[in-house]
Amino acid sequence: MPDAANFTYKLNGRVVATDDAIVSGRAVRNSGGLDPASDYILIQIADRTSRSIGLEEAIDLRQMPQPEFLSFKGDSTFSFTVNERGWEWGAATISASDIYRYASIAEELELILDSAGDTVIPADGAVVLGGHGVERIRSREAKTVVIKINGRSRTIPRRKHSYREIALLAYPDADFEKFKYTITYLKGVHGAEGDLVEGEKIEVKNGMVFNVRRSDKS
Amino acid sequence: MMARVDCLATVFVEDIPEQLEDGVLYVSRQCHVALHNCACGCGEEVSTPLVATEYDFVMEDEGASIWPSIGNHDFPCGSHYIIKRGRIHWAGKMSREQIEAGRAYDRLLKRGAQPKGLGAILAWFKRLWIKFIS
Ligand SMILES: [Zn+2]
């Protein structure tokens, strides 16, 4: 048995080691070179929730498996909820990618802003927290997916799509009597890739890549 | 104004623009595709998927090369050309069947293991293919 127990936590993605089982909010700030410590908000990410840690607050590292902290320069904290769990944040905006990451939300789900009449938050978007009231964010099964077709983004319903439907997305004036469309796909469900031919249908997912080449039938 | 171009400038992008400029070959590595407006100036958009069974793309200092050839019967204008090191090499008539035979040969090679009789099929495609490119 070693003499001193060794504890680690993450601050802004960096691993910090300490011999102390109990650290103060000030000590965590100091370990990241945040000086003066009082100029920074410290946020602790927990199990699908987050909270602000005061300067003199004691944190027991034995009580959590992988403690993770984020720091923000400033003196305001912003409250919101993700799937009915309370969150605190040190900036007036939070990116959707941070919500997915810190709230452990699967990438195939979409984020919804309750307070704005169920608006979908784009995966590369952000939520402004500084407004009136507490923003309520939820995740749900997405009704649409964004695919790439001949290098362009298209939002389409989340369901099976036929050979003709995909060809029409690339060539809205597609003529199936006159032309043949060669459709290849990549990055499908479970990494599916191959050709889509007349009479076939395929399940689509976010980020799936379709390419359509037109050739004459004559 | 329709104007024929004899070379293509290659531009690497993540998303291909909705409207293409003549004389530019747009390449999206992320989307495995290249697009350009037909070099004859007819305005037809040409999609060349960069996957094993469709087109090969090579970028060199002098410019981009795409194989196999572009067009012919595929477009109303009847253009047929090869893009090599950024230049358009206008080619003679080659029927779509010949081009597709070449692609089918490629498909067989790149898709890997096939049932018996593959050797004979491959040899047939290869004969056909070599006949047209030589
Ligand atoms: Zn043309």
Image (spheres, coloured by chain):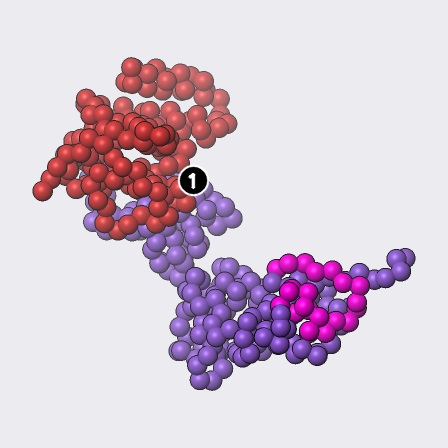
Chain colours: A purple, B red
Residue A22 is inside the magenta segment: yes
Residue identifier under label 1: A194
The answer to whether any part of residue B111 appears in the image is: yes
| Residue plotted at (67% across, 77% down) | A55
Residue range of the region highlighted in magenta in the rendering:
A13-34
Q: Position of residue A84 (x, y in %)?
A: 56, 77
Q: Image check: A69 left or right of A207? A: right
Circle 1 chain: A
B74 left or right of A47 in image: left
Q: Residue at x 32, y 19 (%)?
A: B129
Residue at image position (29%, 18%) is B133
User: Is A201 or B84 nearer to us in this picture?
Assistant: B84
Q: Is residue A57 above or below residue B100?
A: below
Percent position of residue B123, x then y: 40, 16
Instruction: Give the secondary structure at mark 1.
Output: strand
Q: Quadrant of the N terminus of chain A?
A: bottom right
Magenta includes A5? no
Instruction: Please tell me which residue is depicted at 40% across the width and 58% down the height of the picture.
Output: A145
Locate residue A51 relative to residue B88 in the image: left or right. right
Horizontal side, residue A169 vs residue A132: left or right: left
Most extreme residue toward the front, as rendered?
Answer: A36
Q: Residue A171: where, in percent of width, then height?
A: 25, 48
The quarter of the image holding the C terminus of chain A is top left
Nearest the viewer among A92 and B55 is: A92
Q: Is residue A185 visible?
A: no
Res A81 quadrant in image: bottom right
State whether label 1 is within 8 Å of ligand 1.
no
What x and y, as percent, mark residue A203? 43, 52
Residue type for callout 1: Gly
Q: How many marks?
A: 1
Task: Kindly give the residue lying farthest to the bottom in the view shown.
Answer: A133
For disc 1, the neighbor class at 10 Å (few under 14, some 14 to 19, many from 20) is some
